[in-house]
Image (cartoon, rainbow, N blue to C red):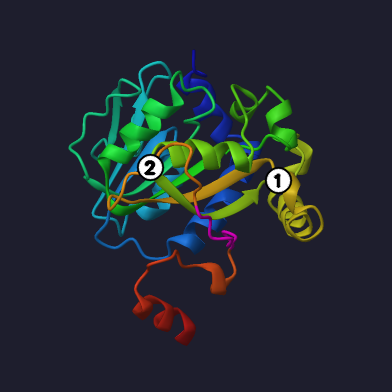
């Protein structure tokens, strides 16, 4: 059974939830600086991470599995609801509908990881990009059950690589985030920023969260035991690391000018 949606929503309204969102959004906004005209899906409980993209994306939908429950999103008065509730491995969307997918609080408590990833593969457009944000196996946040990241199974880089390869995704970029200890006293904006900066330099392998960007390829089917080439690039907020592979060169030129 997944963590209830009200508990996750309450977490994101707390100082710890704000710290988690801020640290992950640094990586996401650097990775995908321009989503103008793209269709985006958030799976699990991804609404807090979809919010900054809503104004420029053509479509942003937050799908929440029925075993977790759903809340209305956006929750502002007068705005059309863009959240959906349904079965974990039977998404109510057409094939190849979305250009970008963000999966948060998704894999840790899933009943069938391979079926879930193949369903995300189905609704992702060819050469579309998926970002998974999951509890890191070596991080402190996976060891404290007072937050949603302490429930279910945490992951290592190797485990995520094998899962993604078996579902016909190619991992191309990796990062870790959330180096502050999972206690409210350490999660204020200034303190968490200090921990994040120090953690990236001094102990990069011990972030509380692990992030991976993967691309959907449709040109060939690889067996689950095939090796998956990994581009060793960090998801980073630094300007030089903001682009995914295969992004148009014109965006790079625009970013350099700024």
Majority SS type along the magenta span? loop
Evaluate if marks 2 and 1 touch, with contact meaning CB atoms under 8 Å apart: no
Nearest the eye: 157 or 92: 157
Q: Which residues are magenta?
A: 229-236
Query: Magenta stretch containing residue 231, yes or no?
Result: yes
Q: Is residue 40 left or right of residue 117?
A: left
Q: Earlier in the sequence, mark 2 or mark 1?
A: 2
The residue positioned 55% from the left and 68% from the top of the image is 241
* SS at badge 1: loop
Q: Residue 134, how many percent across, how many down?
A: 56, 37
Answer with left or right where residue 191 lies relative to residue 78: right
Task: Specify the farthest residue to the left.
Answer: 94
Q: Element at badge 2?
A: loop
Residue wearing tag 1? 207
From the viewer's perspective, is 59 left or right of 214? left
- Identified at 33% across, 24% down, the residue is 89
The x, y position of residue 17, in whole percent, is 60, 38
Vertical placement of residue 144 versus 229, above or below: above
**Which residue is denoted by mark 2 in the rendering?**
168
């Amino acid at each position: 059974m997944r963590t209830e949606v009200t508990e996750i929503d309450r977490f994101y309204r707390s100082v710890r939830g704000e710290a988690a969102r801020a640290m992950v959004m640094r990586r996401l906004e650097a990775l995908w600086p321009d989503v103008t005209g793209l269709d985006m899906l958030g799976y699990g409980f991804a609404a807090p991470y979809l919010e900054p993209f809503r104004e420029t994306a053509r479509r942003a939908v937050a799908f929440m599995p029925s075993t977790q429950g759903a809340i209305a999103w956006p929750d502002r008065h007068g705005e059309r609801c863009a959240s959906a509730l349904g079965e974990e491995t039977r998404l109510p969307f057409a094939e190849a509908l979305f250009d970008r997918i963000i999966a948060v609080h998704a894999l840790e408590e899933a009943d069938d990881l391979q079926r879930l990833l193949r369903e995300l593969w189905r609704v992702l457009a060819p050469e579309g990009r998926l970002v998974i944000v999951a509890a890191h196996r070596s991080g402190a946040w996976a060891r404290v059950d007072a937050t949603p990241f302490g429930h279910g199974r945490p992951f290592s880089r190797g485990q995520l690589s094998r899962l993604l390869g078996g579902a016909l995704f190619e991992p191309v970029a990796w990062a870790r985030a959330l180096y502050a200890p999972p206690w409210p006293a350490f999660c204020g904006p200034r303190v968490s920023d200090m921990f994040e900066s120090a953690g990236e330099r001094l102990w990069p392998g011990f972030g509380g969260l692990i992030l991976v960007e993967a691309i959907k390829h449709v040109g060939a089917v690889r067996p689950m035991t095939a090796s998956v080439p990994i581009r060793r690039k960090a998801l980073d907020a630094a300007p030089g690391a903001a682009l995914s592979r295969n992004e148009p060169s014109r965006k790079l030129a625009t970013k350099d000018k700024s």
